[in-house]
Amino acid sequence: MTGTARALAASSLFAALSEAILADVGRLMRPVEFEVAGIVLRQGHPGDHLILVGSGRLEAWLSTPAGREASAVRDRPG
């Protein structure tokens, strides 16, 4: 099993999938690097991909109805 497939298997979202399916999904994935403090996704834009954090940290900020920003999710590798 590749590193990507192992990382997927460790996630509760993919844990029930067979090794063959995990391998197929892993082959469809591609590594992407983002700048520190760069914007990866924007609230309100279509979510058309999955992000698996391999290293570093991903933090999600949401705009509230009052126009403020609130930290919603902090995610580390895996």
Image (tube, helix red, strand yellow):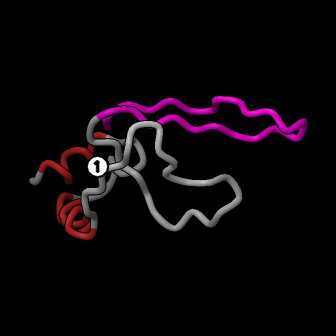
Q: Nearer the viewer, residue 26 or 71?
A: 71
When the figure is inspected, residue 23 is found, relative to residue 36, above or below; the finding is below
Q: Amino acid at mark 1?
A: Leu
Q: Nearer the viewer, residue 78 or 69?
A: 69
When the figure is inspected, residue 63 is found, relative to residue 50, above or below; the finding is above
- Residue at 36%, 48% in the rendered image: 34
- Residue at 19%, 46% in the rendered image: 6
- Residue at 14%, 48% in the rendered image: 3
Q: Which residue is mark 1?
A: 8
Q: Label 1's element?
A: helix
The furthest residue to the left: 1
When the figure is inspected, residue 44 is found, relative to residue 59, above or below; the finding is below
Q: Which residues are magenta?
A: 56-78
Left or right of residue 9: residue 52? right
Q: Position of residue 11 (x, y in %)?
A: 35, 42
Residue 58 among magenta residues: yes
